[in-house]
Amino acid sequence: MTADPLFYKIFKELPELFFELIGESPRDKSIYEYSAPEIKQQGYRLDGLLVTRPGYSFAPIYFIEAQAYKDTNFYDTFFGKIIMYLTQYKPPNEKWHAIVIYDKRSTEKSFPPYLKIFLPVLRCFYLDELGKQPNQSLSVGIMRLVVEKRVKKKTGEFARQLMSKATSEITNAALQEKVLQFIQTVVIDKFPSLTVKELEVMLDLESLRKSKVFLEGKQEGEQEGELKQKLKTISILQELGLNTEQIAERLELDVETVQKNLKK
């Protein structure tokens, strides 16, 4: 696995971090679906695309590229893929943004003068510069971890800091678990020869598992999962002939919750 697939994983599974990076409201993530569509004519593939769900065409589309090496033709290719996508898929959205996430500013090549018409929709982010800010966000930290050099001691320290930040800042148990797992995935990708024991020591996973914040988050996630399973069972019990009160008693839920889910 290289840096690109790890960025794809962020865009797909953790869009919260992408929106945090570009300074957009976290609520925006709920109206988007992630994909990495192939542009058929040339066989091009976009790094990432956040396209709105039906009914939200008033919001912009985000075309995303993560770039960690110099490429003289980068902007030609990027905007070429965007135009081909718009031509082929004809989305109803009036606005779109081209987002480029560079590992460092020196990776960026000069912008072609014949493409300057696209400058108003282009937004570039440089992880090395964002990482120097005093209050570095979790999203910037994780993306920096993806492109950091493979130095075990430094990577371990950085990963532990990010995991601590995730457990203290993310209140949603499911999202917190997903972020923690992703950080571990990045470290494993950088050092594939690590044993499970070495990984646990490197990331101090034993201390993390014993922390109050982690245990509370785990308990909350288990309770949330248990509730989801109960809700799925409601319709099955109804088909078996149980009435609302009997279902509520069997699943230890209130009658109002059962009624609400039966209406769905």
Image (cartoon, rainbow, N blue to C red):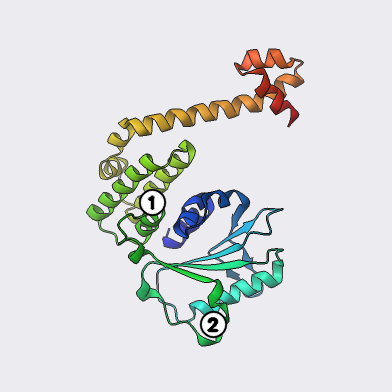
Q: Residue furthest bottom?
A: 113
Kind of residue at disc 1? Leu
Q: Quarter-wise, where is residue 118 in the image?
A: bottom right
Q: Determine which of the numbered discs, if any, sits on residue 116 in the image.
A: 2
Q: State whether residue 78 appears in this view.
A: no
In the displayed structure, 170 sits above or below 252; it is: below
Residue nearest the observer in this picture, 100 or 71? 100
**Residue found at x 31% / y 36%:** 208
- Residue wearing tag 1: 138
Pinpoint residue 261: horizontal percent, then vertical percent.
Answer: 69, 28
Label 1 secondary element: helix
In the displayed structure, 134 sits above or below 172; it is: below
Q: Determine which of the numbered discs, if any, sits on residue 191 in the image.
A: none
Label 2 or label 1, whichever comes before in sequence order: 2
Q: State whether residue 156 appears in this view.
A: yes
In the displayed structure, 43 sits above or below 145; it is: below
**Residue found at x 32% / y 60%:** 133
Pinpoint residue 264: horizontal percent, then vertical percent.
Answer: 73, 32
Q: Quarter-wise, where is residue 256 in the image?
A: top right
User: What whole-number distance in Å separates the C-alpha atoms at marks 2 and 1?
Assistant: 32 Å
Kind of residue at disc 2? Lys
Label 2 secondary element: helix
Q: Report crowding for label 2: few under 14, some 14 to 19, many 20 or more residues within 10 A (C-alpha).
A: few
